Image (cartoon, grey):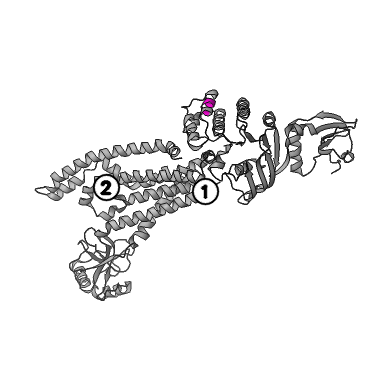
Amino acid sequence: MTRFAWLQSRTQTLTVAAILAALAIAAAITGVQLAHLYNIDVRHCQSSCDLALSQWLSRQTFLQHTLDILSRVAPALIGIFWGAPLLAREFETGTFRLAWTQSVSRSRWVLTKLGMGALATVVVAGALTLTITWWYRAIDLASSNQYSLFDQRDIAPIGYALFAFAVGALIGAVIRRTVPAMATTLGVYVFARIATTIWIRPNLMSPLRKFLALAGASPTSPVQLGVGMHNGGHLQLFAKGDGPEGSWTLTSHLVNSAGHQLSPAQISTFLHQYCPNVGPPPLATKPGQGVARVIGPDAGRACLEQVAKTFHLVVTYQPASRYWTFQWLETGIFAVLALTAAAGCYSWVTRRAS
Amino acid sequence: MTTAIETETLGKRYGRRWALTDCTLSIPGGRVVGLVGPNGAGKTTLLHLAVGLLQPSAGSISVLGGVPAAGPEQLARIGFLAQESPTYARLTVGQHLQMGQWLNPSWDTDFAAQRVAELGLDVGQRAGTLSGGQRAQLALTLAVAKRPELLVLDEPVAALDPLARREFLQTLMEVVAIHGVSVVLSSHLIADLERVCDYLVVLVAGRVALTGDVDELLACHHRLTGPRRDVSDLPGNQSVIEESHTEKQSTLLVRTTDPILDPAWTVTPVTLDDVVLAYMRQARDGGPRSTNHLAVAR
């Protein structure tokens, strides 16, 4: 059965492998070149190093775009083009009746197909993410927070790809038609990714807290602080800060000296008391003009100083050191989801499908 | 004689619809058995249950004494050709034979190669580009080369043109002659079955309407034509399957193993077609069919 499963999938697998190999070779050549330029222009720069760095970063090549797009869509492509048709095409064309009446049990048939597909998925997704992570390492280090590319680098994409493949196979077995199965697979995959990003990942480990002083903060400083209004509504306080270097900031909000978060009523009272001169002159602007009123420099500064004296900013964040823990957790979650989908697919084919 | 397929109050339900209900039958082995019935009679469902593609919703079925598709051994004993002869469109003829060899322990490589050569199929050609007749022949080769004890064919010639149909059935008869394999094949074309089958099972609405040896069925059914008369006073050994009356004349299809003695009747032999259609109508209408409203109901 293994040989037959390979016979069925080898053209597709070898094509993907060839594309991947070409990509890896191109990445190896340009990657070395990129590192070389970085050493010369940026690391050993004599003057105007920031300019050198930004020039180096702006070298947008075709390969960079290709790898960037692939890093986002490769798992979904695997789910759509490998997972969904794996069983759906057999059902759609009736060949499952041919396969199931050979001298091979149905469970062996489905396990072999799933197993070989999963193996190919892990190898392909692994090689791809290795290539991308390696090629981008210098750029990532220089330009961005590691958490901002969390789902496009390192091992998480392998978990995504495995999940997309297994869920595609399950959906294909249930729907039994290739194109609807492909579309549904895409929908389920995208939903699972968004749901994980929004609801699960931030809560996997309890975040750390950090108090930030607001002294000297302004709307343009690293710790941002401002006062204004939207659409002619109530006067509001805006405050925002970040966690330490390389960390993933989850929330930031103002607290009073007792450490309690401020209610809108408290803020309103405070502003009324300490910032009476901030805000629109009566009837000066029509409501609903959509622009925050420009605050008079003196009144605004006095107000913000008072805010800085009275309140602190609390930032919750995941430290940089937890990056790999999160990578493993995310990969693990999707691997478990993939296993669940594969088990559902196995049970559906061996018991329900007929 | 062994039993090829035996069912006991077998039923299969899809959702709320029963495709096969209360089907009890025994299909003998060592024969070429034709399974006939109108569309929707449950032929395909019955055959899929027999090869283990479906699980029964009610009752039981045993094939060659075993549970269908219970394991690789049971699967190896039965060759199946599904409706419309599915093959992998992107695999070549040769790759299909390779598949047969890999997936079947008793695969007959020589037979398969010889068969494909006789059929004039190019082993390098993709199955998706074969004609309907060639594809059916390839699928039959796959089913036969695994050397099964029983060959189950679901409407194998329905999609074929008359020439391809004749060639297919000829191949089938050769295979039966060489390997002595039992065959069950379904069709709604009685003419095809007449040529190859020596045993007949007529299925109507999931029930067996008629079963028996083809020669015996032909020998014991007669068409009687004579002056118009009431059928209720016929001899007790003659059962009326179908009757039709005009003002002056009555035509009956009767079943009897005894000679017909009444000189008023003109006795003519019947075709298998006549017999099968009469039983199908009878089963559908729940009694002998009459074209005259004055006929006395039995």
Q: Position of residue A240 (x, y in %)?
A: 25, 64
The answer to whether residue A80 is seen in the rendering is no
Residues tagged by mark 1 and mark 2 found on one chain of the structure = yes
Identify the residue under disc 2. A133
Question: Is B50 situated above or below B108?
Answer: below
Q: Return the residue found at the far left.
A: A46
The answer to whether residue B93 is seen in the rendering is yes
Q: Residues within 10 Å of mark 1 (few under 14, many from 20)?
A: some
> In the image, is B224 to the left or to the right of A206?
right
Tell me, yes or no, whether the highlighted magenta stretch contains residue B113: yes
Question: Is B133 situated above or below A134?
Answer: above
The N terminus of chain B, quarter of image: top right
Q: Chain of mark 2?
A: A
Q: Which one is closest to the eye, mark 1 or mark 2?
A: 1
Based on the displayed image, in which of its 4 quarters is residue B165 positioned?
top right
Q: Which residues are magenta?
A: B112-116
Identify the residue under disc 1. A350
Q: What type of secondary structure mainly makes up the magenta span?
A: helix
> In the image, is B235 to the left or to the right of A73?
right
Q: Position of residue B294 (x, y in %)?
A: 86, 41
Q: Position of residue B107 (x, y in %)?
A: 52, 33
Towards the viewer: A40 or B277:
B277
Tell me, yes or no, whether the highlighted magenta stretch contains residue A153: no
* Secondary structure found at label 2: helix
